[in-house]
Amino acid sequence: MTPDPLSSEVILEEAEFNPKVKSYWLLSGTLLCVLSVVGIPHLPVWLIVGHWVTGRYLEQMRCVLTKRALKVWRGILVRKEMTVPLDKITDLSTDQQP
């Protein structure tokens, strides 16, 4: 357990995100470009920029569990922080995509 640098709360667990999700996001964007007539000319740009964007987004994602809350940070240009108090969590489910 290490202290969270953003607050005085103690971090119980910190999530690790699978780097394979970057390939999934890149493939999803590529499929959208291919399936839309307008997106086909933009495909080379997406492959270059999308590689950087998906990697950067994954690097910026962070999720920690403290004694009081679950905190999630994400975003590149617009950073979003979400804090959910543990007493407000009533149900958990997992969803695994391909």
Image (cartoon, grey):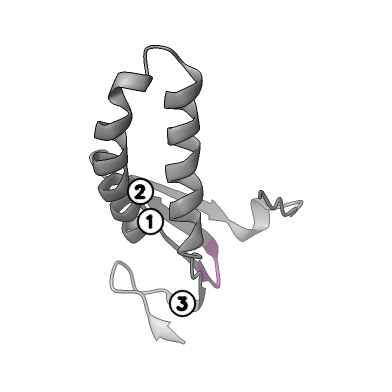
Q: Is 65 above or below relative to 75? A: below
Q: Are marks 2 and 3 in contact (CB under 8 Å)?
A: no
Q: Position of residue 45 (x, y in %)?
A: 24, 33
Which badge, 2 or 3, comes first in the chain's sequence?
A: 3
Residue position marked by numbered label 2 in the rendering? 54
Q: Position of residue 22 (x, y in %)?
A: 43, 54
Q: Which mark is residue 58?
A: 1
State the residue at coordinates (37%, 19%). 39
Is residue 36 shown in magenta? no
**For the residue labelled by badge 3, is the local secondary structure a helix, a strand or a loop?**
strand
Residue type indicated by callout 3: Ile
Q: Nearer the viewer, mark 1 or mark 3?
A: 1
Q: Is residue 24 left or right of residue 5?
A: right
Q: CA distance from mark 2 to mark 3?
A: 26 Å
Residue position marked by numbered label 3 in the rendering? 11
**For the residue labelled by badge 2, is the local secondary structure a helix, a strand or a loop?**
helix
**Chain part drawn in magenta:** 65-69
Q: Is residue 21 left or right of residue 61?
A: right
